[in-house]
Image (cartoon, rainbow, N blue to C red):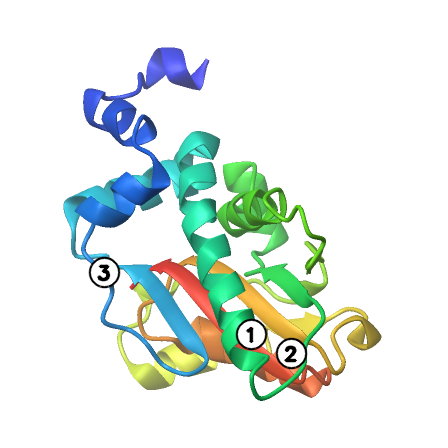
Amino acid sequence: MSEFLYPTSAQVLKLENLRPDELLNILPRSTLGERDTLALFSYQDPLVKEIIWEIKYKGNRTLAKSVATLLYDVIMDELQERNVFEKYETVTLLPMPTSDQRRLERGWNQAEILTSAVKALDAGGRLQYLPRELIKVRYTESQTKTTTKKERLANLQDSMQVQNPAMVSGQFVVLIDDVTTTGATLNEAKRALHLAGARSVLCIAVAH
């Protein structure tokens, strides 16, 4: 019904028909590259915004699958690099959580769509996917409705927790999200994961 009311645009159809490596070639890379926070693309680009919009608000699994291939490659590269210094047999893969209210409004969590698509590529069994281990314990307003750093931090403070700390304790955790802007949401997720005993946390967003 949604496709009948809101038909897929020609631009989106073109994006869906591109291979992951072709997307990588045409989309501008993000300049965000911290030790524990990475992003694939620049959110300032109109095509990147289109892809994010399709996944976030339309649950576009075709585009999610293409983006997931690129996310998977980054995760495997990071695992190989970190294993030079630390030994990790597996990666614990988590999606950025959403509140029950927002899940009800949209019908899905876009981070889960992306993360489950990454897990589907895991032929070697290196990824332990825990879709509901990190949860939102209280509803928070959209970060776009906050105007200052203080408001953003207060809005998110203590809003997440790990349900079963033993599942992430001592693990290399990779957290997947669609977009990161100020980093406040990622920092709250990191706080909850480190509190639960995660050995290392890497956050990867599709765009920044």
Check disc 3: other Cα within 10 Å, few if <14, some if 14-19, many if 20+.
Answer: some
Q: Quadrant of the C terminus?
A: bottom left
User: Which numbered dot is residue 77?
Assistant: none
Residue found at x 40% / y 45%: 67
Q: Do the residues labelled 1 and 2 touch (CB within 8 Å)?
A: yes
Separation of residues labelled 3 and 2 (CA atoms):
28 Å
Residue found at x 27% / y 28%: 12
Where's residue 129, x and y in %? 69, 56
Residue corresponding to mark 1: 189
| The quadrant where residue 205 appears | bottom left
Check disc 1: other Cα within 10 Å, few if <14, some if 14-19, many if 20+.
Answer: many
Residue found at x 23% / y 57%: 43
For the residue marked with disc 2, what is the amino acid?
Answer: Leu
Camera-side residue of 16 and 126:
126
| Mark 2 element type | helix
Where's residue 14, x and y in %? 24, 25
Question: Is residue 55 rendered to the left or right of residue 107?
Answer: left
Vertical order, 202 against 108 (above or below): below
For the residue marked with disc 3, what is the amino acid?
Answer: Arg
User: Which numbered dot is residue 193?
Assistant: 2
Residue corresponding to mark 3: 29
Separation of residues labelled 1 and 2 (CA atoms):
6 Å
